[in-house]
Amino acid sequence: MGTDFEVTMNEYLPLRDVVFNTLRQAILRGELKPGERLMEIQLANKLGVSRTPIREAIRKLELEGLVLMIPRRGAEVAEITEKNLRDVLEVRCALEELAVQLACDRIDEEGLQNLRQAAGHFREVLDSDDITKIAEADVAFHDVIFAATDNRRLIQLLNNLREQMYRYRIEYLKKKECYPQLIDEHKAIIEAIAGRDKDMATRITGQHINNQVDTVVGTLRHRD
């Protein structure tokens, strides 16, 4: 079991949430490897907590697709597979294409300004070498589009999918050679939404997501 992570207490969060966030980040950063078993007793001893918050965290991680429960074996970190990637990003593509179409109709000047600021912040953090910070900036850019839809049900669906997408977003953002393309795609999406051009916004959004699929699939195949 990886030894590079430890629990960081937060007085504003329940212990179960602190443990969940700790294990989640350990998986996303690769400190807990795909296929690695998650032994409740070992994790509890390592983090200095009881088994109850460990068990609760593993349950939540299973719902996010980061952990699998294997009969007669227990919990283990889910592999990043091409099938899982395509399943998640097919759903993301459909939902985000709908989101940009609605944003074309409903975004106001404040929303456009927020979108441009989010794109600018994303560009700024690309030099930080902090993948988590870069991923959060990318998420924030898309969140502005989602908010512009003014559709609570759609936003809820996208948020439910967010954590499953996050792992693949991290894998994609490890490829620095993709950064110029990402910047161009964000710019094109903004221009399409500002111009109320649904067809263009839909096409670029689909391309934006499919580029992520192609890059991560290539990485997975190279590992194999």
Image (cartoon, rainbow, N blue to C red):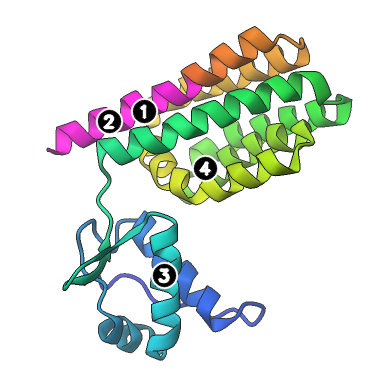
Q: Is residue 5 above or below residue 43?
A: above
Which amino acid is tagged 3? Arg
Residue 111 among those drawn in magenta: no
Task: Please indicate whether residue 80 sits to the left or right of residue 119 in the image.
Answer: left
| Residue 122: percent from left, percent from top | 60, 35
Helix, strand or loop at mark 2: helix
Q: Which mark is residue 217?
A: 2
Cα distance between the residues tagged 2 and 3:
27 Å
3D distance between C-alphas at marks 1 and 2: 6 Å
Q: Residue at (40%, 91%) from the top-left corner? A: 50
Highlighted magenta segment, given as a residue range: 208-224
Q: Earlier in the sequence, mark 2 or mark 3?
A: 3
- Local secondary structure at mark 1: helix
The residue pinned by badge 1 equals 213
Q: Residue at x 32, y 41 (%)?
A: 84
Tell me, for residue 59, which label it has, or none: 3
Q: Say if mark 4 contacts mark 3, CB within 8 Å.
A: no
Judged by depth in the image, the label closer to the viewer, 2 or 3, is: 3
The circle drawn on residue 134 is 4
Majority secondary structure of magenta residues: helix
Q: Amino acid at mark 1?
A: Val
